[in-house]
Image (tube, grey):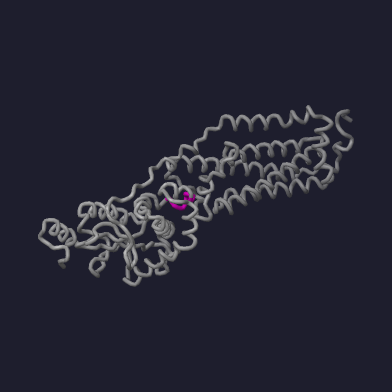
Amino acid sequence: MNKEQPADDVATPGHAIRWPWWLTLFLCLAGLLLSILLERIHFKSNTDPTFQSFCAIDRKVNCDIVARSSYAVLLGVPVATWGILAYAVAAVTALWGLRSRRPLLVTGLGLDLALAYVAASVGFAAVSIWLISAVCLLCIATYAINVLFLGCMVFAARAVGIRAALAQPFRDLGARPLHSLGIALLPLAVALALMASHPAYWHNTPATHRPVPSAPTLPHGVEPGGGHFIGALDPVVTVVEFSDYECPFCRVAHTQLRSLVERFPTRLRVVHRHYPLDLSCNPSLTSRMHENACFAAMIAECAGRQNRFWQANDYLFAEARMMNSRPISEIAHDIGLDATALESCLRAEGPRSVGLDVDEGNRLNIRGTPTFLVEGKTYTGNLPPWVLGRLEAAAEGRLDAGSSR
């Protein structure tokens, strides 16, 4: 018997249970691969504003939102990078368990690691659900791996005694401190090196430096019958646009209308109303065409509660396709909103406000976007040519402000 090896940690045939260690090794390699993928998503999400991962399903199940949150970084290092280190340590432990002649010590180390990993999983899951308000499917997969890892270690520990296994690493630390510290030195050195040298690329994301949209210089407000207006207080023509922030044709029409109202600021009034082609708030549809459209419309309405509707309007036509991969705090920052008030409004008032516009659109039998309502008639796709003629005639003094077509 090795003189340095405690008598209660001698390898015996009864201890040769190998399959939990093989399964643990497989689980750790799977966790390692998932952590590498999560690190890639974290990097791309924080450096490429157009990136959207395969697991950005909606606002509640979205790896990108979790990756972009401040909680995705711990001690100056992405949580995914810590996962890579953690699973590497666990994989080495599993290999040691397959070959070690000290089953009590290595099983105790594996059991302590597994308990720590499961505790970390519970903590990260709580942060994800209650603080980020979104969950990451790949993260959930690592939580499941950690639970299975714990199950393997419990099964392996039964052969040597669970209590004895849990206590053995601490007994070994007291009996052989230099040897035990040597075992821990390498992962500790790697952790310190990561904290000292990992580049903070998440601080350079373009979204954090995007200028806040400026306030419109033209008169603007809310129509008595609903809808936000911009332009003439005593208009020759009023155009009500029913629009969808994810619709590319609506984006073009938005640009054209804003240009037109800048050209005829005392003649034209534009009223924006929402008609998202999204089943989550538009029950008249048979399929969900634009998955972020309802959420974007609610953002605009809630921005209006903070007197920033038109800033949000401009922002959303450019960014709506990315809404499901950005945290509320980031969207609020980009538009210049109070994030807490925005979240509260999205829960309480946003759905009702958008629903009123959708109901009005359905009453008018709107079938697509953009649709324009001018003098009681609807026009889908493009404004009728006579609108520009009317505005030009009024600008040249050939038409009074109150004249009809």
Q: Residue at x 72, y 37 (%)?
A: 93
- Counting the numbered discs, the total is 0
Is residue 319 visible in this depiction of the protein? yes
Instruction: Work out which quarter of the rendered image holds the N terminus and state it.
Output: top right
Q: Residue furthest bottom?
A: 363
Q: Residue at x 84, y 43 (%)?
A: 164
Is the residue 1 above or below the residue 230 in the image?
A: above
Query: To which quarter of the image does residue 391 belong?
Result: bottom left
Is residue 290 visible in this depiction of the protein? no
Is the residue 103 above or below the residue 323 in the image?
A: above
Where is residue 298? Give x, y as percent: 42, 59
Chief SS of the magenta region: helix
Where is residue 339? Give x, y as percent: 48, 51
Magenta segment includes 327:
yes
Residue 295 falls left or right of residue 97: left
| Residues rendered magenta in the picture | 322-328
Query: To which quarter of the image does residue 397 belong?
Result: bottom left
Residue 132 falls left or right of residue 162: left
Q: Nearer the viewer, residue 392 or 154?
A: 392
Q: Residue furthest left?
A: 398
Q: Residue at x 24, y 63 (%)?
A: 238
Q: Residue at x 51, y 43 (%)?
A: 41
Where is residue 242? Give x, y as percent: 32, 63
Q: Nearer the viewer, residue 56 or 129?
A: 129
Instruction: Work out which quarter of the rendered image holds the C terminus and state it.
Output: bottom left
Residue 42 falls left or right of residue 29: left
Magenta segment includes 359:
no
Residue 168 falls left or right of residue 243: right
Where is residue 8? Give x, y as percent: 88, 38
